[in-house]
Image (cartoon, grey):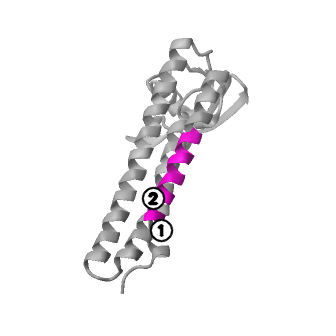
Amino acid sequence: MPADLKTLKDDLTRRMDGATETLRREFSGLRTGRAHTGLLEPVKVTAYGQEMPLNQVGTIGAPEPRMLTVQVWDKSMVSAVEKAIRDSGLGLNPSADGMMVRIPIPQLTTERRAELARTAHKYAEGAKISVRGVRRDGMEQIKGFEKKHQIGEDLAKTWADEVQKLTDQYVKKIDESLADKEKDIRQV
């Protein structure tokens, strides 16, 4: 019994959602000049002999528009948190204040804005490539069903059109996310 179109679309949609979710996480790690806790999401701290996400060794907060804080839970981890943020490549310079690490968010330079925009484009292109890979897999499944005579040529064409429409929707979502992120980068 061949898979039906709904099952195929559900599988492809789930996989394309994964690509857009990855893009959302990557975009949240791009610094736009305003403090938001997602900025520190990609930071990993060497704690207790292993790499851990920053949010597993302290509470991240954004008390002011241009300031992030990390309330470290274990006093012995303060310097490791400070070092992890400094070495993260985000261009941030944290300073410890007891068990609190304060991270001022500096103004973005024109060059840094251009660099962030290029990085956002790279992330968006990666997401589009992932979505197109999912489309290719879907098209190959349809061809396989047709080859095994589980579906006819007309039905295969209809399914292929549906897969293309789904792909176009996701590419459009990615382009919209990129436009929003670029606007965010330019506004600050």
Quadrant containing the N terminus in the rendered view: bottom left
x%, y% of residue 46? 42, 36
Location of mark 2 (residue)? 164
Residue 121 lies, in percent from the top left, at 47, 32
Confirm whether the magenta stretch covers residue 163: yes
Residue at 51% in and 56% down:
17
Name the residue at the right extreme: 64
- The correct choice, above or below, for 102 with respect to 57 in the image is above
Identity of the residue drawn at 40% across and 79% down: 3
Q: Secondary structure at mark 1?
A: helix
The residue that disc 1 covers is 9
Q: Residue furthest bottom?
A: 1
Q: Residue furthest front?
A: 154
- Residue drawn at point x = 43 percent, y = 33 percent: 122
Q: In which quarter of the view is residue 60 placed?
A: top right
Q: CA distance from mark 1 to mark 2?
A: 11 Å
Residue 58 percent across, percent down from the top left = 58, 39
- The residue positioned 57% from the left and 33% from the top of the image is 39
How would you rate the neighbour count of disc 2 (Cα within 10 Å): few for under 14, some for 14-19, many for 20 or more?
some
> Would you say residue 103 sits in the magenta stretch?
no
Residue 180's image quarter? top right
* Position of residue 105 in the picture relative to residue 48 (left or right): right
Q: Going by the picture, which residue comes out furthest to the left?
A: 147
Segment tinted magenta in the rendering:
161-177
